[in-house]
Every structure is written in structure tokens, then in C-alpha cells.
Image (cartoon, rainbow, N blue to C red):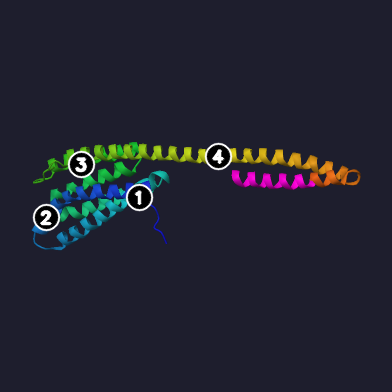
Amino acid sequence: MSAKPETFEDRSRWGRLLGAGIWLLFLGNPLRRLLDEPVDLARIGGVVALGLFVVVYLTGLTQVSRVHTERRYAAAWAAVAVMIGLTAAVVPGAGDQALTCLVFVAALAVATLPRWQALAVVVTLFATTTVVPLVVDGWLSHGNNFAVILASAAVWSFRLAWQRQARLLAAERDLSELAVEQERDRIGRDLHDILGHSLTIITVKAELAERLIDTDPERARAELVDLQRLSRDALADVRSTA
């Protein structure tokens, strides 16, 4: 059995995963903080939460096109909420390094949520990564507040490019379907003309042969022979057109 051809959606999905996989290196900061400290329940829970965070993030990216085409924004919000909850689970073991996770939350929100809802999430996360280090002793932002803005802008540009490409492909598909429909109409008109012309002649000759069969059998026989020829020619024309 031949493999199913790769579609634009498949290529987009793998492209998003590849791009996301590169940026996941930044989660090495909270992971190192979790692994550098003595093993306790907070660190173990943080490592598990961070692993689940990556799974939810990558899974969310594979569903971007489906979320928008099927308007499954409740599922998108659920993914964002789960990622925020997992970020909170990383905080006890990773401290301020857990703020890096919020950059990825912003990226997924921009990729999946409606425009103004995504903007609200980005503003909230920017405020969080800016204000929390100011009010929590010993915490630093590590530039994560600006990373939230940069990541959101980058994902938004990719989202616009994907939507533009999707619209172009949809337009090409519509034009192809229209061309096929027009070709079917043309073939239908050709068949109608061929059969209409041929059947009209056949009908006239058949009526003539019927009238001549008693008065002029030889001519009637000639008309019947001509009818056979016309029928074969019409059939050949129909097969050629089809």
C-alpha cells in the first residue's frame, strides 16, 4: 500500500515542532536549577512538571491549525491553563528560573488563541515576569519579560505567514475545482452537440427508410446501411470526446 502523501498541514505541523524544539533549549535553565539542588520532593515534582510542560506545549503546537479551523478555543485555553499550573509546580524547585516557562505559555497562547485573547495573555505574562521579581526577595527576571514580548511577536509573524499560505492554498484548490467543473461542463456540451446532431440525422433517415421500405426497398436498404455508419461514427465521436 502506498504511503499517504504529505499535506501542507503535515509540513506546517512538523515545521512548528522543529522550531519549538530549538527554543526548548532555554528550558535548560530551570532544569539545571532543579538538578543542581539536593534531591527532595520539590525538585522531583519540578522535574516531572517540567517534562509534562514540554509534552503539553508540543502537543498544543501540533493542534494549531485544527484549533483555528474547528474553533476549538476552549481546548486551547485548557492547554494554556495546564501549562500555567505546571509552571507553578516548577517554582518550588527552580525558583525564579521557572519564569522561563511563561515565555512558552505566551508562545502557545499567541499560536492558538483568538487575537485579543492572546494579547491579554501576553500582557498578563509580561506583567507577571516584570513585577514578581521586584516583589519576591532574591528573584530576578533574567530577561524573561522581554523574552515574552519577543517570542509572542515571532509566533505572531509565523501565524500570519501560515494563515496567508493557507488562504493561498485554499484559493488554488477552489480554482482547481472550478477548472474541473468547467471542463465537465464543456465535455457535457460537446457530448450534447455530438449526440444531438447525430441522433437528429439518424431519426430523419430512419423515418425515410420506413416510408421507402414498401415503395423503394433498395433505397430503404441504403438508408439503413447509412444509419449503421452514422451510429458507428457517433459512438466513435462520443468515445473520443469522453
Helix, strand, or loop for circle 1? Answer: helix
Q: Quadrant of residue 50?
A: bottom left
Helix, strand, or loop for circle 2? Answer: helix
| Position above or below: 146 against 10 | above
Residue 161 sits inside the magenta stretch: no
Task: Residue under label 4, please give it.
Answer: 183
Picture coordinates of residue 205 (x, y %)? Answer: 79, 41
- Which badge, 3 or 1, comes first in the chain's sequence? 1
**Residue type, mark 3 in image:** Thr
| Residues in magenta, as a range | 224-242
Say if mark 4 contacts mark 2, CB within 8 Å. no
Seen from the viewer's position, the closer of residues 238 and 167 is 238
Say if mark 3 contacts mark 1, CB within 8 Å. no
Find the distance from the CA under tag 4 to the CA under tag 3.
60 Å
Quadrant location of the C terminus in the rendered image: top right
Question: In this image, 63 relative to 223: left or right?
Answer: left
Q: Which mark is residue 10?
A: 1
Q: Which mark is residue 105?
A: none
Seen from the viewer's position, the closer of residues 102 and 152 is 152
Task: Residue under label 3, please give it.
Answer: 128
Determine if residue 120 is in view: no
- Which badge, 2 or 3, comes first in the chain's sequence? 2
Seen from the viewer's position, the closer of residues 137 and 13 is 13
**Residue type, mark 4 in image:** Glu
**Between marks 1 and 4 in the image, the one whose residue lies nearer the viewer:** 4
**Residue type, mark 2 in image:** Arg
Find the distance from the CA under tag 3 to the CA under tag 1.
35 Å
- Which badge, 4 or 2, comes first in the chain's sequence? 2
Find the distance from the CA under tag 2 to the CA under tag 3.
22 Å
Question: In this image, 95 relative to 242: left or right?
Answer: left
